[in-house]
Image (cartoon, coloured by chain):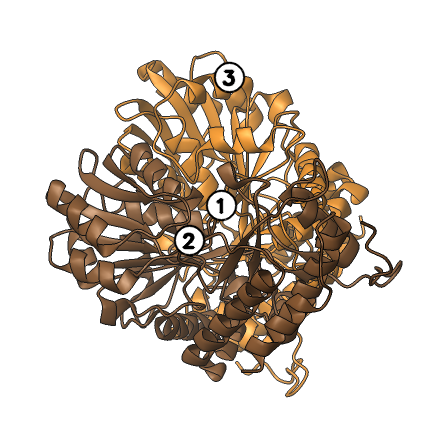
Chain colours: A orange, B brown
Amino acid sequence: MSPGPMPQKGKFMFKQRLFTPGPTPVPEEVLLELARPMFHHRTNEYRKMLEQVTKDLQYVMGTTQDVFTITGSGSAAMEASVACVVAAGEKMISVRGGKFGERWSELGVAFGAKVVNLDIEWGLPVTAQQIADALKANPDTVAVYITQCETSTATVCDVEAIAKVVAQTPALLVVDGISSIGALPFKMDAWGVDIAVTGSQKALMLPAGLAFIACSAKAWKKISTTKGHAYYLDLKAYKKALTPPEWDNPYTPANLMVRAAMKALSMIKAEGIEKIWAETHKRAEAIRAAARALGLVVYSKAPSDSVTAILVPALAEGKTGDDLAKTMTKDYGVKPAGGQGKLKGKIIRFTTMGYTDSWDILAAVGALECSLAKSGYKVEFGAGVAAAMKVLAS
Amino acid sequence: MSPGPMPQKGKFMFKQRLFTPGPTPVPEEVLLELARPMFHHRTNEYRKMLEQVTKDLQYVMGTTQDVFTITGSGSAAMEASVACVVAAGEKMISVRGGKFGERWSELGVAFGAKVVNLDIEWGLPVTAQQIADALKANPDTVAVYITQCETSTATVCDVEAIAKVVAQTPALLVVDGISSIGALPFKMDAWGVDIAVTGSQKALMLPAGLAFIACSAKAWKKISTTKGHAYYLDLKAYKKALTPPEWDNPYTPANLMVRAAMKALSMIKAEGIEKIWAETHKRAEAIRAAARALGLVVYSKAPSDSVTAILVPALAEGKTGDDLAKTMTKDYGVKPAGGQGKLKGKIIRFTTMGYTDSWDILAAVGALECSLAKSGYKVEFGAGVAAAMKVLAS
C-alpha cells in the first residue's frame, strides 16, 4: 500500500528527537553548563559542587550513604561493585535476562569469581522466589547481582521483594540501576539494597561520562575486608577522598560534568522525584496504549516505565525492525533504538525517562505511525496518538 | 614593605586565567561543542567522529598504531597499561621521581606485580643509564614504567634515549605522557615507545574525562598472551571495538567529549604539532627567564616545557607558596598550582601547555610580580615581564 502524503522532513530545518534508552535528551540549561569556563577541581568551588551533587544523588537514590562519582561509563561502576566485593574464588549469583545481566557474569569471570548464572527467559523478570531458591542452593554466595531495568528487553524486576529475600542471608544485593534510578521508584535504604549503581546518561538528564555508586553498611563490611582487584575503581579510595570536609575524587574528575550534574540534579530535586516517577509511568503507559491501538504488541511481560520495547509486526518484504527504526530516524527525525543480541531487528525501543515530556510522546507515536505505514504495515492514522493522548490527559 | 598601588581586581568583572598543569584552558570553540545537541553513539555520525579523533591522535602521538579513547581520567589509561600487561607475580620497574611516578608503583602493587622501584631524587630526571642498570639487575622485567613529564616536579626525562635502552631487552617501555604529549616532542613509533598514555585535560585543550592509549606490536604480543586484571579497561576489548569499519568503544562513551576532541584536535593539526612544541618551549623559556630576572630559582634540574615549577622565596613571616598562589588567584585572577606531597608550600607551578599564548605568559608574570610584592618579597616591577618579553619576541 502507498502511505499517501505524510509529514515531510525539512531540507534545512529537520528537528531531531532522541528516544534511545541512553543517551537520552539533555536540557539546554545542562548542556550550557558544559560550555561555561574551565576551572580547577582542587578548589572550594569544586568541593561545594561535589558536595551538592552527592547530596542530590542521595535524594534520588533514597540513601543516606555516600554516593561516589566516578569518571567513566556505567560499566565502570558495575566493575567497582564486583572487583571490590568478590574476591577471587568467592561465589556470586548473576541474573542473566538480557545483555546487561550478561555483563555481571562477564565481570565475575574477569575477576576470578565463581559465577552462578541464573538464566531468565528474555522479557521475563527474575522473581524473589527464584533468587531465594538460588541462594538456598548456594549458601556461600557473597553477592547477588541483578538489573532493575534490563534495557535490552525493557523489563523491570521487583527489587524491593528481592531485597527482602537477600537481606535474610549473608549475601549482598547489588543492583544495576543504570536505566532505572531517577525514572522508576528506587529506595536504596528503605528496601535494603546493598550496592546501587547508575550512570549519567539515562534518567539523570546528563551526557555519558559519569557513573555513580553507593554502598550500605553491610556492603562496606565486605568491601573493607576483601582483597579486591581495583585501583582506579577502588571504592575505598573514593570513600577516603569524599569524606567531608574534603568532598574530593581520588583521580582527576570530569569537573565540567560535575557542574552539569549539579544543574540537572537541581532540576530533578525541584520537580520532585516522586512526581518524576509518576510522570515517567504515565508516558510509558501512553506509548504502550498507542502500540496496542496500532495492533502492536509490547515485548516485555513486565514492562519497565523507563524504556518500552515494541515487537515489530510483519512489514513489507525483507524489512526488519532496524529498517523501521531507520525510517523513523531518517525520514521523521525520531530516533528509537533497535534490538540487541537475539532481539536484533525484532523490536524497537523508546525511552520515556529523563528529559522527555508528554508532547515528545505524541511526536514519537506520530513518527511511528508514519514509519509503519511507509514500511508496509496497515495503519489507521491517529489511532496511536489518540490512545496516547487519552492516557496522557488522564 | 608596602607594595603601593597595583592592578586591582574588578568587583563585577574579574577575569580568570587558569595556569594549573591540568585542567588547562579550553578554547570556547571546543566548549561549545559540548553544548550542542546530544546524539546517539551507535551511529555513523559518531563512528566518523571517533575515526577522525583516532587519526588525529595518531598524528599527535607519532604512531600508526590504534589509539584508544577511554571514558575516564588519565589514571584509568595508566591502569590499563599495567593491568593488561603485567600478570600477577611478574616484574615491573617503576621510576619514582614524583607523585605520578608513585602511581605506577601503586598500580603494580594493586595488581600483584613484583614492583622494582627506581627512586629518583625529586627534580632530577631518570637517565637512560639508570634504566640500563636497573634492567641489567632485573633481566626478568616485563615492563618499565616512566613519566615523560613528572607534573609534581615539572621535570622532563629523555624518553628517546631511554627507549633505545629498553628496546634492546624483552621489556616494554610504558610512558605516562599525560602532561607532555601534545606539548613536548613525542614520537612513539620513531623512538620505539611500546605504550603511551595521555589524558584530555592537559596539552590537548579539552576538559578532563577522556584518556588515550596506544600500544606497539611488541606490546600487543605481551598483552594478548597475558592473563590480566581488566574488564572496563581491557585493551583487547577496545581493540576489538575500534577495528575498522566499526570505530566503536566497548562501553558507552562520553560522546560529547569525543565531539569536542574532534574540534580540539583539528585545531592542533591545523596549527601543526611541531610549531606547537616550539611555541610551548618558548613560553616555558619566557617564564623561566622571568623567574630568574625576579631573583627566583627554577626548581627542576631538567625543567619540562609543559609546566614550570618555581621555588618560593622567603616571603613575609608565616607565608608559604600556597599563600602566594592564593594571592595570585584571589587578587589577580591568575591561578597557578602549588606543590604536592613533600613540595607542598615550597613551589608554585605554571602550565605553558595547551591553549596558552604569549600574552597569557605576560599576564601570569605580571600577577606573579604583584603577588610577590604583596607577600613581602622585594620586586623590581617590570623585571619579570621584560625578561619574558625578550624571550617571547626572540
**Mark 3: secondary structure:** helix
Whether label 2 touches label 1, CB < 8 Å: yes
Question: Residue at horizontal 37%, vertical 68%?
Answer: B247
Q: Chain of mark 2?
A: B
The residue sitting at the right extreme is B11
The crowding category of the residue bearing disc 1, from other C-alpha atoms within 10 Å (few below 14, some 14 to 19, many at least 20), is many
> What amino acid is at disc 3?
Lys
Which residue is denoted by mark 2 in the rendering?
A: B251
Nearer-the-camera pick, B79 or B17 = B17
Nearer-the-camera pick, B350 or A149 = B350
**Mark 2: secondary structure:** loop
Location of residue A65 in the rendering, given as x and y in whole percent from the top left corner? 62, 25
The crowding category of the residue bearing disc 2, from other C-alpha atoms within 10 Å (few below 14, some 14 to 19, many at least 20), is some
Which residue is denoted by mark 3 in the rendering?
A: A218
Identify whether A311 is placed above or below A232.
Answer: below
Nearer-the-camera pick, A265 or B200 = B200
Which residue is denoted by mark 1 in the rendering?
A: A74
Whether residue A331 is visible here, answered yes or no, is: no
Is A254 on the left-hand or right-hand side of B224? Answer: right
Is A214 on the left-hand or right-hand side of B138? Answer: right
Tell me the CA gap for discs 2 and 3: 29 Å
